[in-house]
Structures are given as structure tokens and as C-alpha cells.
């Protein structure tokens, strides 16, 4: 069973389109995240949600809007896609393991904007 | 910004121990040392974490110096499947803190 799943795995779209990426975790965690990995392979936090509430928004453009319908899901909607949005987007959830908080990542969604 | 410094790349012969160093000289008393790795095209994978004692699990061992300013991740018998980018991250244990990734160390395990 996949702990953190994302759909789609690949997404190719035209500039200006609106698209969504879905994330689900079956670990019972309260906190979920979206990270972006750019072409230079730097992984950077975008958003953090705890129990459906936004905790962190790391200066991400307003075109990006996370939505958490319940604590097992954190979807990412992107409006007016731009070339620079091309990247790999990773969803993660976190729970306590061995006395410290540990994050579990999904397989990633590879977004290519043409 | 990441609070850790790692060598950009390392090679290791298959079957030998891989020792990956990490400097974290500004670590605070309540911050843990975490190690994650990212195998090509996959999401980051948790390996191990520690506060001040050495730790071992089925994947690796973590050796933290007494002053906590540096640590070493040890993969005791590296295999080709261990080829990945390894990230050393220091992080408070207070809830909901995201991981701050640096550039990591690209470990190549060679047959």
C-alpha cells in the first residue's frame, strides 16, 4: 500500500492553462506539505497544512492554491501556468517516529509547461 | 538556507562501507540531525535521525560528535541501489516544521 500517493505522475500542458495535482496519505498524519524541485534539483518547501489549515506559505505566487478537503488530502491547484512552473512537485506528510517528526514523501508529479 | 555543509559528491565501492560526512556547526540544543536520500526520479526517503547519541537502524548508522557540530552517516555495505543524493538536515522537533534541503552529497556506488 502506498503511504503517500500523487496523481498524475506526469503532466504536460500549455502555458496559461489551469491544472491540479492531487495528494493523498493513508498514514493518519495531521500535517501535509508541498515541495517543489526545480531543474537544478533544489528541493524547497511551498506549503504546509496542519489538520486542513494552512500553516506555512513560503512566498509562493497566488497562482498556486493548495486545498485540503480533509486531513488525508492536500491538492495543489495552479492557475495560469508559466514556463517557470515546470518542475517536480512532491507531496509529503509527517508524523512522530522515534520521538521526532519524520516526513514521508510521495513519488512526485513531473510538470512540464510548454 | 540549509544549516548543513556536505561534500557535493562521493564514490564508494560496492560492498564497502560508505561514510558520508556532514557539518552543522550552528546546530541548536533542541535540533535533531536527520538524513534523507533521493534515489533518481523518486521522492526523498527518510533514513535515520538523532539528537546526540549514535543511532542505528536497518538502513544505516548515524554517528554524532560529542559537540554535535558534525555527524557521519554510515551505510555499512553499500550496494548499487544506494546510489542517490543524501541530504543531511538539522531541524527543530517542534511540530510542523518543513525540511530545509541543501545540495546534499551525490553518492555513486561503483561495482
Image (cartoon, grey):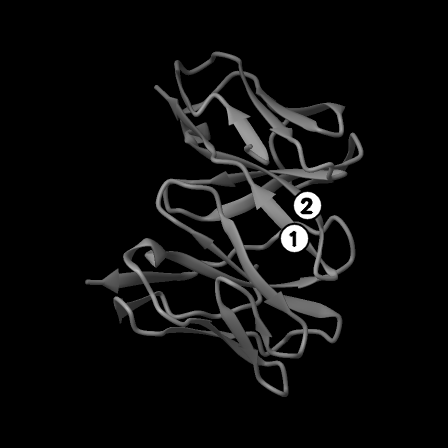
Residue A4: x and y, percent? 58, 34
Decide which of A69, A81 is in the foreground and name it.
A69
Do callouts 1 and 2 mark residues in contact (Cβ within 8 Å)?
A: yes
Measure how far apart labels 1 and 2 are at the Cα level: 5 Å
Q: In which quarter of the image is residue A76?
A: top right
The one of A83 and A23 positioned closer to us in this rendering: A23
Helix, strand or loop at disc 2?
strand
Displayed quadrant of residue B14? bottom left
Q: Is residue A23 above or below residue B106?
A: above
- Left or right of residue B95: residue B38: left
- Looking at the image, residue B21 sits to the left or right of residue B106; the answer is right
Disc 2 residue crowd, few under 14, some 14–19, many 20+, Cα 10 Å: many
Residue B89 position by quadrant: bottom right
The chain identifier of the residue carrying mark 2 reads: A
Q: Is residue B4 visible?
A: yes
Q: Where B9 sits versus A33, above or below?
A: below
Q: The disc numbered 1 marks a residue on which chain?
A: A
Q: Position of residue B72 (x, y in %)?
A: 48, 76
Task: Identify the residue at image location x=44%, y=25%.
Answer: A9
Measured along the vertical axis of the image, is residue B66 above or below residue B2?
Answer: below
Q: Residue A102 carries which label?
A: 1
Q: In which quarter of the image is the C terminus of chain B?
A: bottom left
Amino acid at each position: 500500500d502506498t503511504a503517500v500517493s500523487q496523481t498524475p505522475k506526469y503532466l504536460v500542458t500549455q502555458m496559461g492553462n489551469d491544472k491540479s495535482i492531487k495528494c493523498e496519505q493513508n498514514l493518519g498524519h495531521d500535517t501535509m506539505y508541498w515541495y517543489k524541485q526545480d531543474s537544478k534539483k533544489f528541493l524547497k518547501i511551498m506549503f504546509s497544512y496542519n489538520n486542513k489549515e494552512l500553516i506555512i506559505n513560503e512566498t509562493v505566487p497566488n497562482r498556486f492554491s493548495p486545498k485540503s478537503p480533509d486531513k488525508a488530502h492536500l491538492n495543489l491547484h495552479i492557475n495560469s501556468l508559466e514556463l517557470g512552473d515546470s518542475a517536480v512537485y512532491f507531496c509529503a506528510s509527517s508524523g512522530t517516529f522515534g520521538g521526532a517528526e519524520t516526513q514521508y514523501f510521495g513519488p512526485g508529479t513531473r510538470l512540464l509547461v510548454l | 538556507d540549509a544549516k548543513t555543509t556536505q561534500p557535493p559528491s562521493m564514490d564508494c565501492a560496492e560492498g564497502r562501507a560508505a561514510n558520508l560526512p556532514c557539518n552543522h556547526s550552528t546546530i541548536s540544543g533542541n535540533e535533531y540531525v536527520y538524513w534523507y536520500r533521493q534515489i533518481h526520479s523518486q521522492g526523498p526517503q527518510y533514513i535515520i535521525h538523532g539528537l546526540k547519541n549514535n543511532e542505528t537502524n536497518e538502513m544505516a548508522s548515524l554517528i554524532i560528535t560529542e559537540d554535535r557540530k558534525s555527524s557521519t552517516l554510515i551505510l555499512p555495505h553499500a550496494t548499487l541501489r544506494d546510489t542517490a543524493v543524501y541530504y543531511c538536515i538539522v531541524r527543530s522537533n517542534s511540530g510542523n516544521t518543513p525540511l530545509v534541503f541543501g545540495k546534499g552529497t551525490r553518492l555513486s556506488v561503483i561495482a
